[in-house]
């Protein structure tokens, strides 16, 4: 591994090769944890789902019976040990049961994004050789049927929602409930076989295969063992003192490793309840009704919630707006210190208490975060201002740093030691080293087994001693001992004058403004930084409505002169902030344009987890990028887009290039000196 960790400087922690931990007796697999929970927590709620406006509940004992029935039904269908089974759908108990049922019979669950295109689903299903797919509804059934002729091993499909499927050929298409009923009917005949298969599972058995988001290329199948998932879940649960009484809301994509750890790994280890919202549209209402005590959301969710708050405050009356601004200013001053247990004066505490009564408490209740005891964000860097906003309300929001290949956890932030600019200390059992070029390496019991059918990538990512290259650049903060991630190692570069170029840092500062949904900053090996920007249609549309500005489309609103002026003001505010940072003063944005379309995963510009594909965007919009650097005032462009029904089309627009004021780099140096 070129530039590997053995050539780098150590983190100051032990660097001996980690031993493989042994399982707690009798708990060597997720199905084994299910058996324990069905006995130890038999009558405690395991799953809730809101359907038709009513919360349905299953205890651990009831969930175990549902999973057993499906597992027996799968054996009856002929699913063999080692088979790969695709699971495609939104967060519902049925799919979590399907994952554990598949594990129980010695097969391997492979979760897919439910909003993936048919071609994306085909790649994953063919790559893993899935024989069976368990899907949600007609939409997913149609996707699989569309590509099934190109799937060499695919044989049968199970669906949950029967609506629209009555006239389909049911020769190889089965209802989920029917498979369970067949399993129950044949329990006496097949139970010994199920128990025998369950008994073979150990720490080295495959628990799940999850595919990477494919930021830089085709997704890779990450093979995770029971050891990986259970050890990561056990150590992280102990770190935050998670208990059986926790309540979580399962709403993130099931194909993402974070949902797997929170909704299966930690849920089964701790025995807490997983709550599934009715739909994406009702998620915020369902969040308030459940009031989770343990909550995770990627930065985009927190950004969206903050945007909603700011929009409501713009529409509020003068008194309400004054109260919000006044007490939020005080919260930003002392809220974080109070949360961390640091000394705060009596008057400031009293004023904060009044603010909690009038502003913070009602706001947390509106957001559904009143009961959060432990909250995390990860997936990409969160803007410091956004992070501090939530902590100032008294929400124990922390950052973690992780990867699919690590079974999520690489670093965690301890209570009372939370900072906006770091991602914490090594998680329990994790060792970290920094290479000479700044790349972060780690090893732990959670380190993945391999990339499926990709020995070359496995060897280039994980060395024989178990050290994994993250692809991220970072360093340990001398003051706190916590890890700071600068950016993706491949994205960190140098400007033409040799100054550091870290685009993600600048992008996150831009996205703090509710009007900016997405930003992509360029500048590597160039004299100046420039940016593409997406407006947030909700926030800017609300502003347009308040100001009696009519518009017929996103494109028209994005190009409105007053919108461009507002975005320019935001960019210039970020530039002034960057001028205070001697390391990144050169990354001020000189010119930008507001894109005529939102960056979209269906168009290949983002991953399904909403990560920007920087290379794809640079290539796709190379004409726009050229205009940002050749002195043009505007540029005409035509872009292919994908509509919701899968049809292709194109949109054209003339985009204005906007100049933004910057502070000379010398000013930044002077500020640092002062």
Image (cartoon, rainbow, N blue to C red):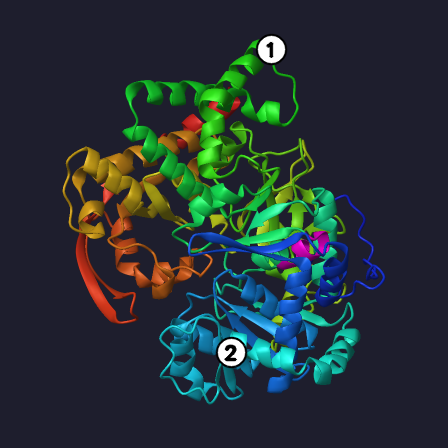
What residue is drawn where x is 30% and y is 27%?
A: 316
Q: Name the image quarter holding the N terminus.
A: bottom right
Nearest the viewer among 389 and 267 is 267
What residue is drawn where x is 66% and y is 79%?
A: 72
Q: Which residues are magenta?
A: 264-271
* Residue ID for mark 2: 125
Question: Considering only order in the chain, which callout, 2 or 1, is on the residue closer to the N terminus?
Answer: 2
Q: Position of residue 460 (x, y in %)?
A: 63, 68
Nearest the viewer among 453 and 390 is 390
Q: Answer whether residue 631 is visible to the viewer in this image.
A: yes
Q: Secondary structure at mark 2?
A: helix
What is the crowding at mark 1: few (fewer than 14 residues within 10 Å), some, or many (at least 20)? Answer: few
**Residue 259 is one of the magenta-drawn residues:** no
Mark 1 and mark 2: span between their CA atoms? 61 Å
Q: Quadrant of residue 27?
A: bottom right
Identify the residue at the far top of this view. Answer: 347
Q: Which mark is residue 256?
A: none
- 63 relative to 16 in the view: left or right: left
Q: Quadrant of residue 405?
A: bottom right
What residue is drawn where x is 61% and y is 16%?
A: 344
- 20 relative to 581 in the view: left or right: right
Exactly how many numbered labels are in the figure? 2
- Is residue 256 positioned above or below 475 on the image? below
Nearest the viewer among 40 and 639 is 40
Q: Quadrant of residue 510?
A: top left
Q: Position of residue 542 (x, y in %)?
A: 25, 39
- Is residue 217 positioned above or below 6 on the image? below
Q: Answer whether residue 582 is visible to the viewer in this image.
A: no
- Is residue 444 positioned above or below 559 on the image? below
């Amino acid at each position: 591994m070129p530039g590997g960790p053995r050539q780098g400087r150590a983190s100051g922690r032990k660097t001996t090769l980690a031993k493989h931990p042994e399982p707690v007796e009798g708990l060597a697999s997720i199905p084994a944890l299910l058996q324990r929970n069905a006995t130890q927590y038999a009558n405690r709620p395991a799953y809730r789902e809101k359907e038709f406006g009513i919360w349905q509940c299953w205890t651990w004992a009831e969930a175990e019976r549902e999973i057993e029935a499906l597992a027996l039904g799968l054996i009856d269908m002929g699913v063999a040990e080692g088979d790969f089974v695709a699971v495609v759908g939104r967060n519902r108990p049925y799919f979590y049961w399907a994952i554990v049922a598949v594990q129980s019979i010695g097969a391997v669950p492979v979760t897919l994004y439910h909003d993936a295109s048919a071609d994306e689903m085909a790649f994953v299903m063919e790559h893993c050789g899935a024989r069976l797919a368990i899907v949600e509804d007609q939409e997913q059934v149609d996707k699989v049927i569309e590509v099934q002729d190109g799937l060499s091993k695919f044989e049968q499909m199970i669906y949950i929602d029967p609506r629209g499927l009555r006239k389909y050929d049911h020769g190889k298409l089965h209802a989920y409930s029917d498979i369970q009923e067949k399993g129950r009917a044949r329990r006496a005949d097949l139970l010994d076989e199920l128990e025998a298969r369950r008994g073979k599972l150990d720490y080295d058995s495959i628990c799940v295969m999850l595919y990477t988001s494919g930021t830089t290329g085709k997704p890779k199948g990450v093979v995770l063992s029971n050891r990986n998932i259970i050890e990561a879940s056990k150590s992280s649960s102990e770190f935050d003192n998670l208990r059986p009484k926790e309540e979580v809301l399962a709403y993130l994509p099931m194909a993402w490793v974070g949902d797997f750890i929170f909704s299966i790994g930690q849920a089964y280890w701790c025995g807490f309840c997983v709550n599934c919202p009715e739909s994406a549209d009702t998620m915020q209402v369902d969040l308030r009704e459940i009031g989770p005590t343990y909550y995770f959301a990627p930065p985009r969710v927190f950004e969206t919630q903050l945007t909603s708050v700011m929009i409501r405050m713009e529409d509020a009356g003068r008194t309400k707006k004054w109260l919000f601004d006044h007490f939020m200013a005080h919260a930003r001053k002392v809220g974080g210190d109070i949360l961390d247990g640091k000394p705060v004066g009596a008057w400031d505490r009293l004023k904060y208490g009044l603010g909690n009564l009038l502003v913070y408490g009602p706001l947390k209740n509106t957001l559904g975060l009143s009961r959060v005891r432990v909250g995390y964000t990860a997936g990409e860097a969160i803007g410091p201002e956004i992070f501090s906003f939530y902590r100032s309300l008294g929400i124990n929001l922390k950052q973690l740093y992780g990867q699919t290949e690590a079974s999520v956890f690489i670093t965690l932030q301890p209570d009372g030691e939370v900072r906006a600019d770091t991602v914490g200390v090594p998680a329990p059992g994790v060792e970290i080293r920094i290479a000479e070029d700044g790349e972060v390496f780690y090893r732990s019991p959670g380190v993945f087994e391999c990339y499926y059918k990709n020995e070359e990538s496995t060897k280039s990512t994980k060395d024989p001693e178990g050290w994994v290259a993250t692809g991220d650049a970072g360093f340990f903060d001398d003051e706190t001992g916590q890890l700071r991630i600068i950016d993706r190692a491949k994205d960190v570069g140098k400007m033409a004058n040799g100054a550091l170029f870290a685009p993600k840092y600048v992008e996150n500062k831009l996205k703090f403004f509710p009007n900016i949904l997405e930003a992509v900053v360029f500048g590597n090996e160039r004299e100046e930084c420039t940016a593409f920007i997406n407006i947030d249609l909700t926030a800017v549309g609300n502003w347009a409505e308040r100001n009696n500005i009519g518009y017929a489309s996103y494109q028209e609103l994005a190009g409105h002169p007053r919108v461009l002026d507002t975005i320019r003001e935001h960019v210039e505010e970020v530039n002034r902030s960057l001028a205070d940072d001697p390391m990144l003063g050169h990354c001020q944005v000189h010119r930008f344009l507001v894109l005529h379309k939102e960056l979209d995963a269906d168009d290949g510009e983002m991953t399904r987890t909403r990560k920007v594909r920087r290379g794809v965007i640079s290539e796709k919009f190379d004409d726009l990028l050229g205009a940002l650097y050749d002195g043009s005032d505007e540029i005409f462009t035509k872009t292919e887009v994908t509509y919701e029904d899968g049809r292709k089309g194109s949109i054209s627009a003339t985009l204005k290039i906007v100049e933004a004021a910057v502070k000379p780099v010398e000013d930044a140096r002077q500020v640092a000196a002062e």
